[in-house]
Image (cartoon, grey):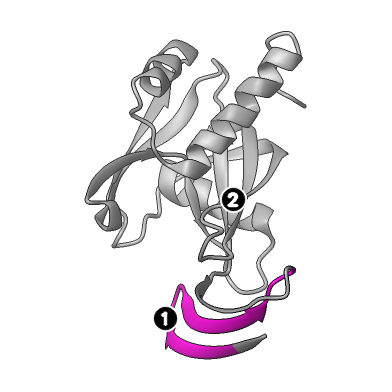
Amino acid sequence: MTRHSIYQGKVVDLGRETVLLPNGQNITLEIVRHPGGAAVLALDDAERVCVLHQYRHAVGGWLWELPAGKLDPGEPPLTTAQRELAEEAGVRAQQWESLGTMVSTPGFCDEVIHLFIARQLSAVPLRREHDEVMQVFWWTAQELRVRLAQGEVRDAKTLVALYRWMLGSVQNGGQPVE
């Protein structure tokens, strides 16, 4: 593989890569290299889910999302998840579980997002960054089902985390995977 850098930003590295595919074909692709991220499905004592209504310029408006953020260099995914939950939602958790990983857009980007469930929550001060425009909501299972059925949740990491949590709930007699 050869790589020609096109743009190096603070979040992404865009390059043109020439690669040999498993079928023997050489092709050139535009690939975004990303440090990865972590997202948190936070559940309060009433099993309500923390959801952010966040403004995202790239998609032209507001999205419903779980608290999430980019991994800092050398930072473990759990540390990122803990930091982002405190900064964006104003809570910290005593119990953490992995929901695995997901790739966000594998056609042109190598971003891997680590998914977590957080429980046993307590309040901490919000510490949002200047470019974060969001509100915190806590959805019941019924609210969640309605919004999912109506297609209101479009963010991939949020959908994958909710799906994995809900699937675990079904497989374990109504309780999330421990």
| Direction from residue 155 to residue 119 in the image, left or right | right
Which residue does the image show at 40% across and 54% down from the upper left?
127
Q: Can you identify the residue that label 2 sits on?
A: 81
| Horizontal and vertical percent position of residue 50 | 46, 31
Which residue does the image show at 68% across and 13% down from the upper left?
170
Q: Can you identify the residue that label 1 sits on?
A: 9
| Horizontal and vertical percent position of residue 73 | 61, 74
Dot in front, 1 or 2: 1
Residue 62, relative to residue 20: is it above or below?
Answer: above
Q: Quadrant of residue 171?
A: top right
Element under disc 2: helix
Q: Amino acid at mark 2?
A: Ala
The quadrant in which the N terminus is found is bottom right
Number of other residues with Cα within 10 Å of mark 2, as a class: few under 14, some 14 to 19, many 20 or more: many
Q: Quadrant of residue 46?
A: top right
Element under disc 1: loop
